[in-house]
Amino acid sequence: MFTETTTTSPAVGDVLQDHYWPPVRPFSTLAGQMAAFLVMEASEKATYMSPLRAESDVYGEVLHRFLADIYSYVLGYRDGPCSSQRNDELEVKLLQAKIFLERELLESWLKVAPPPDFVETQEEAAVYLEGLTANNPGVEHPLFGFLEKEASRSTIETFLRCEVVRNEVVDDEVAMLVVGLQGKLKAVAAANLWDECGHGRLQQFHTHWLRRLVAQTAGWDEIADYRASDLPWFARVTSNVNGALLTRPAHKLRAYGCFLVFESWVAPHFRRVLRGMERVGLDAADTRIYFDAHVRIDPFHSQELLDGIRLQRPQLTLDEVAQVLNGAHIAVAAGSSQYDRMLPYLDSLNS
């Protein structure tokens, strides 16, 4: 169980910054299943995956655990292979597997609604996305009603661990979003990154607020242990989708549309999370700060992202508009898939 404390000072903030972030242990070795997959030829990888597709959760678990290993490498934190020393042979294999698995994720496992054919211009896209962000299966997903009204303290604690893992590298995700965009889209993404990075002040980094949450609740060792042994595979779905879109140049505009939807969910979801936290007594300032701050600031970010599409120069082509919309639909599919699995998982822990 989490044990909350109730005081924070600048000195505590300095201590928090001494911890490695994200709260991961150094890389040791790839799991045997992943190691074997990496040395397969492309045809062997396809043969390996083919029978798994009939079992959605088995398929999903293999796919998302493999992708999590790959994005640990891509992001370069100490839990990833080759994060401290180059290994050309292994890195080639990791990148080959990345391309194969991303195709599986986006074209097979994830069921994405097609973009509407009546949207052709930037203004039409912005209007459509404004409606989509207000009305999609993720906005009022029953997971968040459960957290608000039914989840026990220990169940909410587990959810908070999953939220730390999901959000611990959002600043790097936004940094990757900035690269390659043009005009207003780039300006909006860069402004969002500046906010994520606390306007240059370490103790205002959004990840520093997560440091405060970890320090006041789970603790550094506990969350590392949870990640290593108990984190469910489906807690990685939205992170892996971000990785797939942000690290492939051809998906850059899809990444923008995806990010827009994820940002639009933050305020309605976090309001309900905060009410659930208050109900069970998880209401210390350091526990709440990440969620409180995002309830205030993310509606503004969502509007900025919509305005970026409206005001973009150079003008987006018809195909580029479709890519943005496709990314938004990918986000809806990914988030809904994750929440659909997270709800029964947390409900099974509820006591």
Image (tube, rainbow, N blue to C red):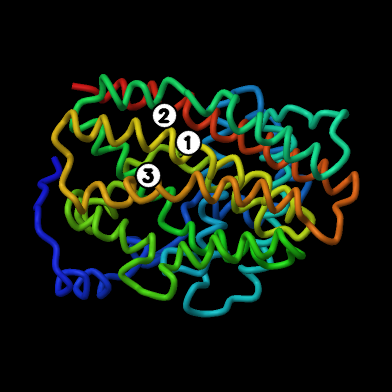
Q: Which residue is mark 1?
A: 234
Q: Amino acid at mark 3?
A: Glu
Residue at point 26%, 30% (across, down):
276
Residue at point 62%, 38% (across, down):
331
126 in relation to 55, above or below:
below
Q: Are marks 2 and 3 in contact (CB under 8 Å)?
A: no
Q: Position of residue 45 (x, y in %)?
A: 70, 45
Q: Which residue is mark 2?
A: 342
Q: Amino acid at mark 2?
A: Met
The mark nearer the N terminus, 2 or 3, is: 3
The mark nearer the N terminus, 1 or 3, is: 3
Q: Position of residue 154 (x, y in %)?
A: 19, 33
19 in relation to 253, above or below:
below
Q: Are marks 1 and 2 in contact (CB under 8 Å)?
A: yes
Q: Would residue 41 be seen by someone viewing this image from the given angle?
A: no
- Between circles 1 and 3, the one closer to the viewer is 3
Residue at point 73%, 56% (across, down):
252
190 in relation to 283, above or below:
below
Q: Which residue is mark 3?
A: 163
Q: Is residue 271 left or right of residue 182?
A: left
Residue at point 13%, 40% (across, down):
1
Q: Amino acid at mark 1?
A: Phe
